[in-house]
Image: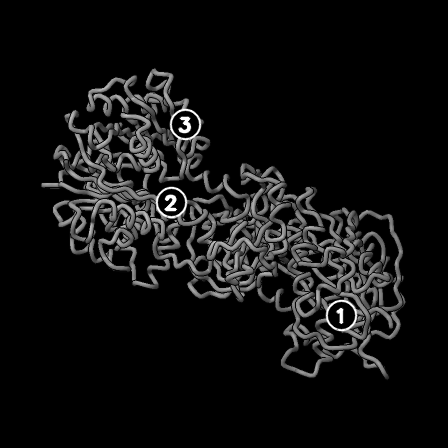
């Protein structure tokens, strides 16, 4: 059986910076456009975790053979390895982890490698967190995001065929919008259109993307892609996720699950005899990458369009700058850190496995040499702790270093037993109460030892 | 054969910001007062215990017994450094008592000191939890936050209010006005407490003890030898307990965040030894560990002054204020005296001794004959309780 796409997921952060906000800060006339940006404690590894965890939601992780991680902005620190993300996802130790980088098209390359791999199922994750100089015209042209695509034996959600791939040596790093549009037109016009109803288009910038779509002569991908900024290696994969989710929603039996943004192009998909709808997926970057996407099944729940709709505008320019530079400016570097402790406690710290006393069954979130309840020293049973739970108590800390005070600390009772104390991310203090339901996600905690350190934080479900 | 010890000399420096006095200066001053009261020379001490909890976020002094030797200007005696978080002071006293009762020495010295203000507050005790400790567990908590979660639970369980918390701070600051050794002696109003900057919800700056320098010292002998000394107060009972590790309450879904098991265990031991039947009635005063306002309310319940959840009422009824039936923290407590960590447990004993001697001018509990001290450490998992009695 041919490999197919089994699941897709997007991580698009809610925080939105508009060109208007930027221009106001510099006393310039208003402009259109906006980007999304990751919270101060999110970076490519945590974005990748979020998208991957979602894509694997109803998949038996122990079956995964390969994890591809593609990024052009991955932190250059040992503590941020792709292998750590694999462990945080609780993937089997034998999973092959493949890291790609160096070019925006590396996300597409990873996907193509997955389709040609014999080590399936494979998860392809692309994540980027892109920053252009403050005050530059490109400040809101780029964005932060991640996409994850699970590839395995079909039929699944979609199949890819008719791959086209060419390398192109021309530099995109130009402020000349008309030239960039020309560049996109030049690449996109090489695509063989076949019989496709709609195109999902990725290009480094709004104008090039529109130019490429126009060169294809097809209704272009959803406008939602234009609202988040160009997310580097993740962008073409986000375009594919959007295509599969919106088309899958149309193909799905339940009209209620249709995403809000799919309406305008709803008539685009052309049914084929004996198969699903066909679409064109095109990425212009350091070359042209394109494939035909055939939708074969409905997605259970869209992740891209709802995330784009959940925009939380940040209108103070200073808040954006502070969130961007918090770790870079050395905050939290004085925190004691120890790779020895990490490797010793990694089963809990990274895999989030707890222990159950062999004698009294009490759960120890962090195993100790003896049970704290009954004193038994019999070897406890290790098991994966639940990553959801309920707030048992909390406080808001106003004197802990953070670019967005206060830090809310929550004592969380995990579903199925065990307790953990974690910071709450992305929520204003008034949103947290006793009994609040939370989910644990991987976030950057501090820069102990001068390298990013990752741990669990709670986000509201 | 006696199984009790007596305090025959006590010393305490003023608590505050001693920018012009060093760690050793403070130790020397507290020891001079204590030894002077006992009429002893440093060379007559058999052994000493030095309590400093956090040398490495302070001035890197107090890492070992060596830092007491030069303060006293003596050598050739056994000195042990004691470290048991914020209950280090109480533990120093306990260790000194055991050496006396074992007959190893005839005179023992317990000294506690912490020099925190050679650094800005943010770099001393706040930094302790933000930057030191386990690299991941509980990161984001300050000391205030680790007790604030008890207040939040109590708001749900017992209807605790921010005004109840503020009332503790108002009472203790009023008491401190009469204590020349307290760090902060200015009375505050409930409005000021509620309106001061939020530190860890629901605790504001005035719900928290300040960052303070200070030292305390006690000279101890066996009860049978006490008659030789001019000043003497009996340590009628002592209890000490470590109920769990640092992280355990935060990793144990059975922990209720209402009270501290270690305090109840230490109090039970101390009360049994001292023959206390009804702690709500038998004490003339108490010095308890109000590092944050919430902690005094918890202490009153764990020490058996009232039932679970009833401590705010005890406070509202005036029982625990100076002039009430059982004043709690007539010194002003940690909230006003400050909390030089290693010194605190011994400073409490110093205060109760002065009250029993009837020389606590400006804050005297009239007719004080018997009092209790409660010193905790960590997330309430370490506790020392002592019962002191006129002899």
Q: Residue furthest front?
A: B1
A148 up-or-down from B240: above or below:
below
Q: Is residue B69 left or right of residue B216?
A: right
Q: Is residue B205 left or right of residue A43?
A: left
Nearer the observer, disc 2 or disc 1?
Answer: 2
Instruction: Give me the C-alpha separation between circle 3 and circle 1.
Output: 62 Å
The spot of residue A147 in percent (x, y) is 71, 61
* Residue underneath mark 3: B62
Identify the element where label 2 is drawn: strand
Instruction: Give me the C-alpha separation between circle 3 and circle 2.
Output: 20 Å
* Residue underneath mark 1: A6
A261 up-or-down from A274: above or below:
above
Residue at image position (57%, 63%) is A386
The spot of residue B201 in percent (x, y) is 38, 53
Res. B382 mark: 2
Identify the element where label 3 is drawn: loop
Nearer-the-camera pick, B182 or B379: B379
Callout 3: chain: B
The spot of residue A299 in percent (x, y) is 70, 74
């Amino acid at each position: 059986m041919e490999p197919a796409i089994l699941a897709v997921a997007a991580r698009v952060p809610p925080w939105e910076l508009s060109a208007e906000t930027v221009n106001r800060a510099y006393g310039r006339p208003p402009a259109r456009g906006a980007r999304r940006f990751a919270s101060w404690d999110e970076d490519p590894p945590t974005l990748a975790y979020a998208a991957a965890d979602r894509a694997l939601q109803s998949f038996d992780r122990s079956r995964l053979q390969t994890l591809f991680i593609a990024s052009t902005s991955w932190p250059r620190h040992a503590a941020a390895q792709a292998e750590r993300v694999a462990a945080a996802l609780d993937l089997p130790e034998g999973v092959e982890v493949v890291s790609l980088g160096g070019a925006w098209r590396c996300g597409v390359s990873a996907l193509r490698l997955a389709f040609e791999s014999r080590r399936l199922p494979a998860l392809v994750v692309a994540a980027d967190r892109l920053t252009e100089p403050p005050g530059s015209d490109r400040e809101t042209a780029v964005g932060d995001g991640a996409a994850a695509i699970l590839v395995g034996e079909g039929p699944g959600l979609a199949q890819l065929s008719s791959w086209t791939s060419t390398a192109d040596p021309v530099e995109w790093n130009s402020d000349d919008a008309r030239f960039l549009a020309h560049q996109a037109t030049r690449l996109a016009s090489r695509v063989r259109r076949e019989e496709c109803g709609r195109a999902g288009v990725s290009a480094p910038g709004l104008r090039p993307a529109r130019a490429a779509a126009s060169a294809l002569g097809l209704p272009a991908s959803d406008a939602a892609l234009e609202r988040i900024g160009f997310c580097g290696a993740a962008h073409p994969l986000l375009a594919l996720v959007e295509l599969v989710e919106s088309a899958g929603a149309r193909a799905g039996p339940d009209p209620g699950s249709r995403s809000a943004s799919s309406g305008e192009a709803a008539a685009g998909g052309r049914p084929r005899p004996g198969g699903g709808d066909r679409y064109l997926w095109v990425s212009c970057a350091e070359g042209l990458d394109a494939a035909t996407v055939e939708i074969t099944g409905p997605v259970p729940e869209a992740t891209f369009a709802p995330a784009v709709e959940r925009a939380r505008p940040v209108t103070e320019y200073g808040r954006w700058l502070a969130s961007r530079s918090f770790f870079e400016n050395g905050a939290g570097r004085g925190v004691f850190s120890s790779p020895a402790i990490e490797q010793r406690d990694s089963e809990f710290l990274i895999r989030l496995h707890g222990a159950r006393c062999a004698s009294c069954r009490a759960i120890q979130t962090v195993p100790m040499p003896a049970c704290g309840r009954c004193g038994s020293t019999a070897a406890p049973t290790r098991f994966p702790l639940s990553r959801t739970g309920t707030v048992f108590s909390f406080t808001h800390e106003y004197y802990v270093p953070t670019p967005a005070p206060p830090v809310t600390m929550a004592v969380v009772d995990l579903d199925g037993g065990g307790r953990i104390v974690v910071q709450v991310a992305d929520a204003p203090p008034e949103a947290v109460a006793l009994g609040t339901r939370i989910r644990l996600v991987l976030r950057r905690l501090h820069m102990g030892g001068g390298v990013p350190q990752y741990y669990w934080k709670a986000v509201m479900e | 054969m006696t199984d009790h010890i007596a305090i025959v000399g006590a010393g305490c420096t003023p608590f505050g910001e001693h920018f012009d006095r060093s760690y050793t200066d403070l130790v020397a001053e507290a020891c001079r007062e204590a030894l002077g009261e006992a009429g002893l020379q440093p060379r007559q001490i058999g052994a000493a215990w030095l309590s400093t909890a956090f040398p490495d976020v302070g001035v890197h002094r107090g890492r070992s017994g060596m830092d007491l030797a030069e303060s006293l200007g003596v050598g050739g005696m056994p000195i042990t450094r004691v470290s048991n978080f914020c209950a280090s002071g109480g533990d120093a006293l306990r260790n000194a008592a055991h050496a006396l009762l074992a007959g190893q020495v005839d005179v023992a010295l317990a000294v506690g000191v912490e020099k925190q203000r050679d650094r800005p507050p943010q770099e001393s005790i706040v930094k302790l939890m933000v930057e030191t400790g386990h690299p991941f567990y509980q990161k984001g908590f300050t000391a205030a936050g680790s007790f604030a979660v008890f207040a939040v639970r109590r708001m749900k369980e017992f209807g605790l209010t921010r005004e109840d918390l503020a009332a503790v701070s108002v009472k203790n600051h009023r008491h401190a006005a009469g204590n020349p050794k307290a760090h902060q002696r200015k009375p505050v109003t409930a409005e000021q407490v509620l309106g001061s900057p939020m530190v860890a919800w629901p605790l504001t700056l005035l719900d928290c003890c300040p960052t303070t320098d200070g030292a305390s010292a006690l000279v101890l002998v066996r009860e049978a030898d006490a008659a030789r000394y001019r000043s003497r107060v009996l340590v009628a009972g002592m209890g000490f307990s470590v109920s769990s590790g640092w992280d355990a309450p935060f990793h144990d879904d059975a922990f209720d965040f209402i009270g501290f098991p270690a305090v109840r265990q230490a109090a039970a031991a101390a009360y049994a030894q001292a023959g206390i039947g009804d702690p709500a009635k038998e004490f003339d005063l108490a010095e308890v560990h109000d590092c944050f306002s919430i902690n005094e309310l918890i202490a009153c319940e764990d020490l058996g002054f009232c039932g679970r959840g009833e401590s705010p009422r005890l406070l509202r009824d005036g029982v625990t204020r100076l002039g009430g039936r059982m004043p709690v923290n007539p010194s002003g407590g940690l909230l006003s005296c400050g909390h030089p960590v290693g010194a605190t447990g011994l400073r409490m004993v110093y205060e109760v001794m002065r009250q029993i001697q009837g020389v606590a001018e400006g804050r005297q509990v009239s007719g004080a004959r018997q009092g209790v001290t409660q010193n905790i450490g960590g997330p309430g998992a370490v506790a020392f309780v002592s019962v002191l009695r006129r002899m």
